[in-house]
Each structure stands twice: as structure tokens, then as C-alpha cells.
Amino acid sequence: MSEQAPRSPRSAAAGPGAVLSTVRRVGQMGFSRGLTVLAHVNQVDGFDCPGCAWPEALPRHRLEFCENGAKAIAHEATRKRVTRELFARHSIAELDAHDDQWLEAQGRLTEPMWLPPGAERYEPIGWDAAFERIAAHLRALGSPDEAIFYTSGRTSNEAAFLWQLFARAFGTNNLPDCSNMCHESSGTGLSETIGEGKGTVGLADFELCDLILVLGQNPGSNHPRMLTVLQAAKRRGCAIASVNPLRERGLVAFANPQEALGLLGVGTPLADLFVQLRVGGDVALLQGVAKHLLELEAAAPGRVLDRAFIDAHTQGFEAWRAAVERRSFDELERASGIARSSMCELAELYARSERVIACWAMGLTQHAHGVANVQEVVNLLLLRGNIGRPGAGPCPVRGHSNVQGDRTMGIWERPPADFLDRLDAEFAFAAPRAHGHDTVSAIHALHDGRAQVFVALGGNFARATPDTELTQRALRRAALTVQISTTLNRSHLVHGREALILPTLGRTERDVRGGVAQFVTVEDSMRCVHRSTGRLEPATPELRSEPAIVCGLARATLGAAHPFAWESFASDYDQVREHIARVVPGCEDMNRRVREAGGFVLPSAAGARAFRTGSGRAHFTVQEIPAHALPPGQLWLMTIRSHDQYNTTVYSQDDRYRGIAGDRRVVFLNREDIAVQGLAEGERVELSSHWRGETRTLAGFRVHAYDLPRGCAAAYFPEANPLVPVDAFAAGSRTPAYKSLPVSLRRG
Ligand SMILES: Nc1nc2c(c(=O)[nH]1)N[C@H]1C(S)=C(S)[C@@H](COP(=O)(O)OP(=O)(O)OC[C@H]3O[C@@H](n4cnc5c(=O)[nH]c(N)nc54)[C@H](O)[C@@H]3O)O[C@H]1N2
Ligand SMILES: Nc1nc2c(c(=O)[nH]1)N[C@H]1C(S)=C(S)[C@@H](COP(=O)(O)OP(=O)(O)OC[C@H]3O[C@@H](n4cnc5c(=O)[nH]c(N)nc54)[C@H](O)[C@@H]3O)O[C@H]1N2
Ligand SMILES: [Mo]
């Protein structure tokens, strides 16, 4: 099943298509305005691209053609506006009849809107009155734990720090976030094995490695700037292997739009090896690779494994070895869908490579065995000491541009005790210790009436979450739902008995508080904390920044006499950073260091081989082979992103790299499975998911033949989310199993 890359790919990712698409996006913002904004993206004195969390190198590129970054920016910098007239013209039911693409295409929200209890339409409300409504609800709760404070990962460090401080001052750790649905399996898997929940590598390591593994990730669409780094690595002889049920276009070939030939569409193949495994087959594949490494070591003792590293820095090796040796290749082949010969090929490539980086994203984390996937990657890295030395290490590639920073700032329903101790000391209060709700348990709490108020700092909870029907019922049971947002989405229309929309500034916009231009900070996927300074005139003068909204809410709820300096925090973010510097290890002297070009990098102890696991050692872990057999007729469905969406924000119905135009209600199937199921390409089918005796069904998916392994299927997120059972989540991290749903198909 693994194949060599074609030598001269016919059509490469990026290239002229990306440039054209970028130019179109610039037009959407107004040409000169669009160019101004693109000239400042990811610049030292500019704003951080809201697209993804892939880091920027120093010195920065001027005018980078990242097609999907441009889409995210244009979406925020659009000239379209959602006005009070739109809400007056359309009842909520009418708005709710529109699809996600239409909602987002209405443009930027412009003023606070209020839905009184029982009303059918949102009406304008002043900021202070809005804060008072929310405060009244919060104060009326029987317990602070009946409130939920959700966060999405675009929120700046400053807003996130204030948000968690407010929630904890109010009295709860109910801080679920998008990370619960995203890289939580990485955080959990890494913390348990290497003692910290982040990657250890930096961009410089990509200049030194001999092999980059890209597991369960589609960088061509979701981290396009990563392709430039892969291309540079490839050019100096580094090998790249993709482990993915799909041969994603960006990894097949990349035409770098920053280069003349790339602009003409001439692409370079990126991945040397495609391991097209079954959905959910990673643990078995990686154990097969490891098993062969043990064989190679037996044949040439001392030549393959890094025994010195294993002895000095790890524990659990012998138990792990015994477990892997007990596995048969037959079993591993069946579970992974990959032939033993291909496992050996990957093992030999790995053994030949002095320095290895393993990158991964949602293809590993969003499974019932998401944590096991991550820990099996760690096992593989530990075998040859591929951690804590230059050019090697784990690299979970984060999604939202500040999702990693939000966690660093304390957005966590299970905060570590030492973080709370430092917070208590800094602010002279007692933060609650009981763990709060994560995303899944927040849905249950709302559904069961144990939570009454839901406030979201960004995101689209009604669409991003699993089990759409149940989640939406849960939101409708709340006494109050509040969305702090930039654009209109489903979560404004799936509301509690009373609801509020609080419109906020985006990354691209100037943020002047107390007469002084403010900046915020973010942390990228490689632990670099840097400034983000908006440049555009705000969409309307009514908008408030996220920090200002959080402070307004805190002041209204906790009362004017509350001892924290909410008012000054809202007008001077340096003051917030002063506190962060004292609470968050690694952020010392933040105000000075973040003003330096490119910011500063948070330390990684594991990156220096100091493993904070209790034992001081990195842990080998024994993973079970996840169950993979299905009843006849069922397939494993993964839900994936198209090239033309940002999570729940759908830009168009096309998916250029996968040959889809004008339709997102598509199910990708292997040609032979289409035949075996008695179906024909192009016909519409009903998809049913099966889980613990429950069935969830969605109709109207068009069958599309695609190059993916037998027994597997793919559909788009968020259209397929109603099929995902709320309690089908990863052991340990509780990340929804968005990428391994047993489904059946029926004509109709
Ligand atoms: N333009 C754009 N950029 C984005 C986003 C966006 O929606 N649009 N979203 C952002 C966010 S929040 C995130 S988290 C990232 C997401 O970035 P990705 O993780 O790249 O996105 P996905 O499309 O969810 O799926 C990843 C890949 O996993 C593969 N996969 C599925 N199941 C398995 C499996 O069992 N094993 C293996 N090995 N692979 C599997 C799929 O084929 C797919 O290629 O991107 C971020 N960047
Ligand atoms: N089936 C399935 N479900 C999934 C996934 C999957 O792969 N498959 N992926 C999961 C993943 S990885 C993630 S991260 C989640 C994403 O979950 P969320 O983060 O909750 O969802 P988004 O779609 O990113 O949120 C989009 C909304 O954020 C608001 N917004 C944009 N920018 C800003 C800003 O600067 N400030 C504020 N306050 N609001 C802003 C806009 O109003 C926009 O409508 O979805 C998860 N759901
Ligand atoms: Mo994500």
C-alpha cells in the first residue's frame, strides 16, 4: 500500500491557482485595503495570521502567498456588515433556515444584539446593558459551576488570561475550549510520556532533520506555509513520509508561489513515501515499524536503537519490547491495512535517518485511541533518541492560531495545581480547585440542566461539537447563551431562552484603548510568543476588543468593588502582561521580551531531555491494538476539512485539490466499496453511524469515488457532525472520535 511519489506530478498544490485565489480575496477586501492588510500579515510589527498556528521564520517574508491565510484574513477584513436592520428583517427562524456559508458571508457583526426571553428577533442593546443582563443571570445561579465559559483558539493571550481569571474569580473551572476537540490527545499523550503537553522542536530543527514524518495531517490545505519548510528540507536531501489514508495533494506536489517556477505551476514532489493506511490503523502500523526496528537491532546489535539514551533517559522499554515482540505481523497487517514489506520499508528509512521529526494533526488525535496514537509516535521517537537533540522531536501541529497560547494562559478545565497556586498568590484570592467541564461534559451539563448560562469567547459551539442534534437541544435548554464573535454563525441562532451577541474586534483591526494603540500576543505551535498588532480601521466604531469585553463582563458580574483592576486591564494590556509574567513560567519579563523582534520562545524541558514525568524519565507505553473489525457492510468514516473552509466557516462548496466542485454533501469511497455496496458514483445515499446500539442518520450524501483504502470513507466536517455520538471520545483526552465512526450506507 505504500507507494513512491510520482516523478512529475501533473497538477501541484498551490501554484497559480493559489495566487489567483489570493488575488480574488484581496479584491474582496477592496484592493488597496487588501494589499495593506496582506503587507502586515505575520510581520514583526504587523498582526498574526488568524489562519493557523504554523510559525513564521525570521527574517519575515514580505507579501506571503498563503492562499488559505488570505481567505481567513479576507473573511475578517470583509467590507460586508451584519446590521441591526438584518436582524429586524429576519426572524431567528428565518436566519436559521440558511446554510453555514450564507450566515458567515453576511460579514462582520456591528453592535451588541439582545434576544429577550420569548422573542423571535434580536434587537440592539447597549454594551453596559448587555453586561448587566449577563451579570444578572450569573449572579442568580445556584452555583458558579452552573456557568460555562467556552473559548475558541483565536483568542489572544491577554484576553485568555483575563477570561480564565474572570471565570475563576467568579468561582468555576468550567473552561472548555476548542482544544478539547483538537489536540487534547496530543497534550495528554505527551504529558504522560515526556512530561509536557507541547512539541519540543522549533523551525531550526527542520533545517537539520533527515526525515520528517507527517502523520494524519493535510498541510496543503490546513497549514500551507508548512509546505515551504518541507520543500526546503526536501531540497537539501531530507526524506518525507506521509502516513494518511489519503494521498493529500499538497504532499504529492507543491508549486511554491514564492518562486518563479512555482508561480507557473511547476511543482516539486514532497513526500517520498505514502503509507496509505486504514482509518484508525496508526497504532498497528507504528508497532509494525517498531517490530522491524527490533529485528534490525537484533541483526546488528547496538547499531539501530539508541541504547545509551534509552538507558539514561527512559523507562518501560523492556515491557514495551515484550509487548511488541508478542504481536504478529499478520495481526498488524490486518489492523493497519499495510503490508509487512511497507512497514519494513518505513522502518528502514527511519533507521537510516539520523534525525527525525514527527509532525501530526487531527488524523491522529480524533479517534477513540487518539492518545494511544500519540504515545505510539513517542515510542518510535524514543527508540532512537529522537527527542532533545537538534533536528529531532515530536511536533503536534496546532490548528487555531493561538490555541496553544490559550492553554498556556490557563484556559483549562483541569488546571495544574501549580498554576492555580501562582494565580492565587498573584491576585490574593483562592481559585476553585475542582475540575470543570470540558466540551463533552459541558454538552451533558447543559442538556441535563446542570448548567444554565453558556458564554463563548469566539468559536461556533453549535456546529463544531459532536452530536449536533443533542448539542443544539442542550444549548436551547440554557437560560442564557452569549456569543462574543466577529461574524454570524449557527451558535447565534441556536440559543438559550435569552441570548446576546457581543461583536468584537478581529486580529486585523487597530485596537486603541485609553488613547493608546494596543497590541496583543499569541503563541505559535513551536512555543514562540510574539506580538500581533492590528492595522485596519475597525469594522465599526462600536466594536470592543476581547480584553475590554471580558473586563466589562467581569466588572458587571463581580461588582465595582471587586479588588482586581478590571478597568485598567481593559485600557492597558501591559498591565495584564505584568501579571502573566509573574504567573506563567517562561513568560518572565514578558513586556520587554515580547517587544523584541520575533518575540521569545517558551522553554521546553523535554527538549533538553529533562522529563517532568515524576520519574525524570520519558516513558515507553504499551498500547493495545484498537478494535478494527466491523460488521459486514460497515465502513470507518473520517470527517475532514475541505480546501475551502476554516473549521465551521465554509467559504465555498468546492474542494479544489480533491476534485470536488459545488457540493459539500459528499461521501468519498473506494471504487470497489462502491461496487460491493451496489451503489453508483454520483448517486445520493443515506449515512448512518452505529455506536453502542444507537443509530444516527443523515441523508443526501453524493457518492464520490476516491483513492482511499477499502473499508474507509470520508465526509466533510461540520456537515457530518450529527453522526458523531457525544460519548464516542478518546480514552484519556475525551477528544471526540470525529475520525473513526462505523457507518453504513443506504441508497436514498
Ligand atoms: N484553511 C484551513 N486551515 C486550517 C483549518 C481549516 O479548517 N482550514 N483548521 C485549523 C485547525 S483548528 C486544525 S486542528 C488544523 C487541522 O488540520 P488537519 O489535521 O490537517 O485537518 P483534517 O482535515 O481534520 O484532517 C487531517 C488528515 O487526517 C487524515 N486522517 C484521518 N483519519 C486518519 C487516521 O486514522 N490516520 C491517519 N494517519 N490519518 C488520518 C485525513 O485524511 C486528513 O488528511 O488545521 C488548522 N488550519
Ligand atoms: N466532525 C468534526 N468536528 C470537528 C473537527 C473535525 O475535524 N471533525 N475539528 C475540531 C477542531 S480541530 C476544532 S479546533 C473545532 C473548532 O471549533 P470552534 O473554534 O468553536 O469553531 P470555529 O469554526 O473555528 O469558529 C468560528 C467562529 O469564530 C468566530 N471568530 C473568528 N475569529 C474570531 C475572533 O478573533 N474573536 C472571536 N471572539 N471570535 C472569532 C467567528 O464568529 C466564527 O463564526 O472544531 C472541531 N470539530
Ligand atoms: Mo483544531
Image (cartoon, helix red, strand yellow):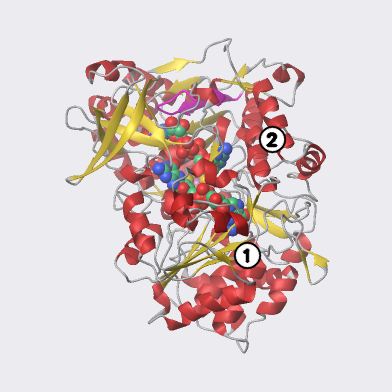
Q: Is residue 241 above or below residue 90?
A: above
Q: Which residue is mark 2?
A: 25
Q: Which residue is mark 1?
A: 159
Q: Which residues are magenta?
A: 238-250
User: What is the quadrant of the C terminus in the image?
Assistant: top left
| Circle 1 SS class | helix
Q: CA distance from mark 2 to mark 1?
A: 28 Å
Q: What is the three-letter code of the residue carrying label 1? A: Ala
State the residue at coordinates (40%, 37%): 639
Measuring from the top left, give residue 635's x and y in whole percent: 27, 30
Q: Which mark is in front, 2 or 1?
A: 2
State the residue at coordinates (72%, 58%): 540
Q: What is the three-letter code of the residue carrying label 2? A: Arg
Q: Answer with left or right where residue 153 lies relative to residue 597.
A: left
Q: Answer with left or right where residue 174 lies relative to residue 624.
A: right
Dot 1 surroundings within 10 Å: few (below 14), some, or many (20 or more)? many
State the residue at coordinates (61%, 80%): 555
The image quadrant that residue 746 belongs to is: top left
